[in-house]
Image (cartoon, rainbow, N blue to C red):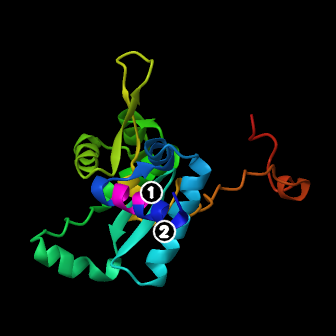
């Protein structure tokens, strides 16, 4: 299979899937080395970009997906009569940030950080496909550990969690220092017990 045929095969597989696929899985289906398929994925992404195709190839961590170019999202939404997703609330963004920066985490951890019940928000984010159950922890009650999904990466236009902006430095109050000898001179030592 030459390079052009390989790019065509990768494009067909990604188009038919509609969902993100690991490069390893595509390579297994084509019975080719993963490195060769990864090179074809990169070449396909460049080809789509060069010709300003209506599709773009997105890398989402170790997965790839064909997506509609952002400029064409409104006409596509109109033709398919798709509703715009409702925007995320402030609480949803907070929960998503706690999970993204600390994953995998339990609901209890998120609630401890936020100080409020997060059941509804976690359910909503799961339903939207932005977070998912990663595994059950080996603790009493077997709590669910949550993490982000490839849809999260796609929505925030990043390829991996390493691209998340760094968290701001927390202001830590300066430790109270012992008063100097000069400051102690004005204190009556008989008052201090």
Residue drawn at x 40%, y 41% is: 110
Q: Is residue 150 above or below residue 143?
A: below
Residue drawn at x 37%, y 40% is: 111
Q: Which mark is residue 44?
A: 2
Question: Mark 2: which secondary structure?
Answer: helix
Image x and y of residue 46, in percent: 52, 74
Q: Is residue 65 above or below residue 136?
A: below
Q: Is residue 187 left or right of residue 41?
A: right
**Does residue 167 appear anywhere in the picture?**
no
How many numbered callouts? 2
Magenta part of the chain: 9-14
In-front residue for pair 151/80: 80
Pick whichever of labels 2 and 1 is earlier in the sequence: 2
Mark 1 is surrounded, within 10 Å at the Cα level, by few (under 14), some (14 to 19) or many (20 or more) other residues, namely: many
Mark 2 is surrounded, within 10 Å at the Cα level, by few (under 14), some (14 to 19) or many (20 or more) other residues, namely: many
Q: Which mark is residue 163?
A: none
Is residue 10 highlighted in magenta? Answer: yes
Residue drawn at x 30%, y 53% is: 17
Q: Main secondary structure of the magenta part?
A: helix
């Amino acid at each position: 299979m030459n390079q052009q045929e390989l790019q065509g095969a990768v494009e067909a597989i990604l188009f038919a899937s509609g969902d993100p696929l690991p490069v390893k899985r595509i390579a297994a289906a084509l019975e080719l080395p993963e490195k060769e398929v990864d090179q074809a994925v990169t070449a396909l992404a460049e080809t789509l970009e060069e010709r300003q195709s209506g599709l773009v190839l997105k890398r989402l961590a170790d997965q790839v997906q064909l997506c509609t170019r952002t400029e064409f999202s409104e006409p596509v939404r109109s033709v398919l009569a798709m509703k715009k997703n409702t925007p995320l609330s402030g609480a949803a963004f907070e929960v998503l940030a706690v999970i993204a920066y600390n994953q995998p985490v339990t609901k209890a951890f998120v609630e401890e950080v936020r100080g409020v019940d997060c059941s509804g928000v976690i359910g909503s984010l799961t339903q939207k496909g932005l977070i998912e159950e990663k595994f059950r922890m080996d603790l009493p009650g077997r709590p669910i550990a949550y993490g982000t999904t490839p849809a999260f990466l796609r929505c925030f236009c990043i390829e991996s969690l390493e691209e998340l902006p760094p968290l701001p430095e927390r202001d830590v109050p300066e430790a109270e220092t012992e008063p100097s000898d000069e400051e102690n001179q004005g204190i009556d030592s008989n008052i201090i017990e």
